[in-house]
Amino acid sequence: MTILRPVGLGRAAVGIAAAVSLAGCGGSDRTTPAPPRGIATIASAPPTAAGPDALLLRVARAGGIVRAVRFARPDSEIWTSTAKAPSIARVLAFDDNQGSVAIVDAKGTLRRIGLRIGDVSAPPAIKLTGLASVDGSAVYGVTADGAVARLLTTDVAPWIFHAPQAAHEVAPRADGTVIVVTASPAGGSALYRIRPPESRILDSADLPAAERLVRSQLGDRLYLIGGDVIAGVGGREMTPFAPITFPRRIQSVAATPSGDRLYVALDSTTGLQVVDRYNPQATATVDLPGAAISLRMDPFGRYLLARPAIGDSAWIIAVGTDRVTGTVATVWTADLPFVGADGTVAVNAYPDVAFVDSTGVTKRTVAGGAKDFWIAVQWNGFRPRAPGLDQPVTFPGGGAADSTDTIAALIMKSERDSIGRSTRPESGGPAPRAVIDTAHGSLATRVPPLRQGGESAGYVVQFASVLNPVSARTTAERISANGLKPRVVPSTEAGTTVYHVILGPFPTRASADAAGRAAHQQYWIYQGAP
């Protein structure tokens, strides 16, 4: 299944996926009475901590009505669409602002499933291949004549860009730029970076010929795979790094969400090669019972799933230790197996879907679940709307702000006033608790609320949580929110030091969200201070 990035508290651009720690529960797939189509709330759900709700969308593999369920209770239907979705080939991304899932149907066409009113968009007039998106709103593809086209949810006509040569791949990045991959006149690959809707080429790079692309979730690395070679570029300047050559043809490559490490499966080779981005050679290996032909990274960075060359099963590999923790039987499809928000692995035990732990032990089963296509999203859109959201915003001094500059000034003042305050917990207070992600060589963490003077310590904006301090500092240096630079805060979880790249604390969630947006990077908002 496809797991989409966490959303609901901040607009995504680049960064490591964060997850909400949820407790799984058992039960069969008995369907409860469905609410009206296109209308849903989670009014009956118990109060949850700040953060988006972990949800699952289910639709028949041949197409049909879309159903939403809670991740922890996949047998409890909370929403159904008003329109039927087509047969889904793959999922592109989730637009948390619009509550829209961008998918590619079985015909290779872009479609959008709207969770607010339950509609499904019609196919666009333009035919595109190589569809890609990072935020679900802007979808890019290649036209029949090699041009790059962008389709926004609000577009009447697509935006078109013509590279110096015909494009064959397009890689949008979370900072708003796009890398266009073409064949170079010398026989290799030529890469061009642009920032739509401008057509001016900002940077370019020449790399060896490639067969496919691998993107890091953090967005600052793009890997090109060709035969037995991995090449690529990193950073905003598109600086090429030395190609890495392997002794055999490359079967599959998976990048950790931060891009700190690459896992490489080679043809007819037992085990995986591990490449560190700071050491351009294979620095370690993962022992496997046999050869792997496909790799699937947990977006939350905890586990890597490897598909054996023989048999319908999956090896579950803990990214933190690079060791196999379990083997589980599963059919591999575009959506299954996948690692869920609570760390369990959903597997295709046709005709059922089973959720197993990292050792392969079944925790719960959804009867008949394998007949559906599964999509995981994290979104607050099904929660009851807080009455205060419909109240006009007021500001100190009694006047309403009449410009974005005034609002930004107030937000930045709150940030500057907050910086420098002691953020240490009171004696006995909770320490930051890592709840996920080591895949990119990192752990996505949840910072629990801390108290100062009997009140909440506010809200922090987190851009990344990584295991490598150099990666954390590099990430912090390239981010700026209206002139403010994030800082690196270390924490220790189970003996492992994690480095958080954060801004704040901010007095309100709104001010934290505004700062996150100003950085033009993927971010998450947590209540409390590190």
Image: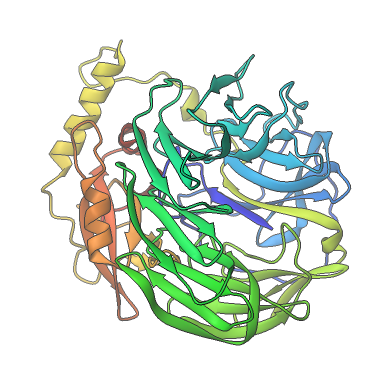
The residue located at (41%, 66%) in the rendering is 244
**Residue 110, position as x, y percentages in the image:** 71, 34
Query: 413 or 386, which is in the foreground?
Result: 413
The residue located at (54%, 59%) in the rendering is 226
**Residue 122, position as x, y percentages in the image:** 78, 26
* Relative height, residue 509 to residue 426 (above, below): above
* Relative height, residue 265 to residue 471 (above, below): below
Residue 398 placement, left or right of 158: left
Q: Quadrant of the C terminus?
A: bottom left
* Relative height, residue 469 to residue 97 (above, below): below
Q: Is residue 430 visible?
A: no
Query: 254 or 55, which is in the foreground?
Result: 254
The residue located at (21%, 56%) in the rendering is 473
Q: Quadrant of the N terminus?
A: bottom right
Query: 243 or 129, which is in the foreground?
Result: 243
Residue 247 placement, left or right of 365: left
Q: How is the image coloured?
A: rainbow
**Residue 48, position as x, y percentages in the image:** 52, 53
The residue located at (46%, 63%) in the rendering is 256
Count up the numbered dots.
0
* Relative height, residue 140 to residue 242 (above, below): above
Q: Is residue 326 visible?
A: yes
